[in-house]
Amino acid sequence: DVDYICAIVMNEFEILYDRFIDEGFIAIVDEYKSCCVTLNRDVVVIRGGDEISAYAYDISPTGELMLETDDGDIEVQSGEVSVRGIYGYV
């Protein structure tokens, strides 16, 4: 039943959103990390037309994606991140 599934998703979202509003991202960062498909994967970040190949190793307490590159570690606050999967980058 689509309505039932939507209700479950929205109820869970509301719980997490309330925690986020009351306590900030730090309150939900561990749960976010456990569901994040980007972590522990090779990624490509497209920033201003430049592509940066990196390894996504963590999410900071304020929500930035932590990346290891050949030139050192960087944090991504915005931009497009592609995850390398079995079919290439998606």
Image (cartoon, helix red, strand yellow):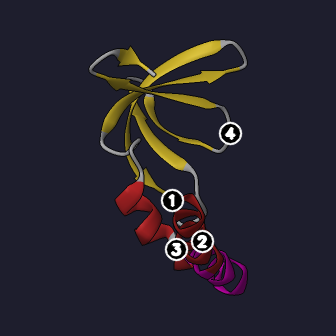
- Residue 73 versus residue 35 in the image, above or below: above
Along the line of sight, the residue nearer the viewer: 59 or 74: 59
State if disc 3 and disc 1 touch (CB < 8 Å). no
Number of numbered tags placed on the structure image: 4
Discs 4, 1 touching: Cβ within 8 Å: no
Of the residues shown, which amino acid type is indicated by label 2?
A: Ala
Residue, disc 1: 60
**Eyeballing the image, is 35 above or below 51?**
below
Residue 51 appears left or right of 83: right
Crowd tier of the residue under label 2, counting other residues whose Cα lies within 10 Å: few below 14, some 14–19, many 20 or above: few
Q: Which mark is nearer the camera, 3 or 4?
A: 3
Binning the other alpha carbons within 10 Å of mark 3 as few (below 14), some (14 to 19) or many (20 upward) gives some
Question: Where residue 87 appears, x then y in whole percent?
Answer: 32, 15
Residue 46 coordinates in the image, percent (x, y):
61, 21
Q: Which mark is residue 49?
A: none
Q: Which residues are magenta?
A: 15-26
**Which residue bears the numbered disc 4?**
78
Please name the residue that numbered disc 2 is placed on. 7
Q: Which amino acid, by three-letter code, is at mark 4? A: Ser
